[in-house]
Amino acid sequence: MRKYLIPAAILAAGLALGGCAARPEVIAARLAGYDATCRAMGFQPGADNYKLCRLTVFQTEENRRARIDAERTAAAWRYLQGIGELGSASNPLNVRVTGY
């Protein structure tokens, strides 16, 4: 019972903190990145296709974040249920996370 207490606490904290709203400076940086991506693709600010580009980049990024969150949650549940293999000590859930 005791061996499950720490992983369960880590899982609960991770799930609780995963829904935290981003700080304004983080949001501003993301929007600047979306702008830079669309400009690099040749879209001009203010044009309808530029707005569509920003929306598409935003949706793609949100889908990527949702996929990563789902992978983390699934890995945590596998770990808690004893189904998956354990990773290294620095990455006990054996989740590969990039760019998040």
Image (spheres, rainbow, N blue to C red):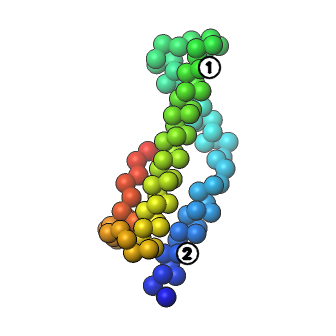
Residue found 36% across the figure and 62% down from its top: 94
Spatial separation of the CA atoms under disc 2 and disc 1: 42 Å
In the displayed structure, would residue 73 be above or below residue 63? below
Q: Decide which of tag 2 and tag 1 comes sooner along the chain.
A: 2
In the displayed structure, would residue 94 be above or below residue 54? below
Residue found 56% across the figure and 33% down from its top: 59
Q: Circle 1 is placed at which residue position?
A: 51
In the figure, residue 48 lies in which quadrant?
Answer: top right
Q: Residues within 10 Å of mark 2 (few under 14, many from 20)?
A: few
What SS does tag 2 mark? helix
Residue found 37% across the figure and 71% down from its top: 83
Residue at the extreme bottom of the image, as rendered: 1
Residue 7's x, y, as percent? 48, 75
- Does 50 sit left or right of 88 as displayed? right
Amino acid type for the residue under numbered disc 1:
Lys
What SS does tag 1 mark? helix
In this rendering, does residue 46 appear at all?
yes
In the displayed structure, would residue 93 be above or below residue 71? below
Label drawn at residue 9: 2
Amino acid type for the residue under numbered disc 2:
Ala
In the displayed structure, would residue 42 be above or below residue 22? above
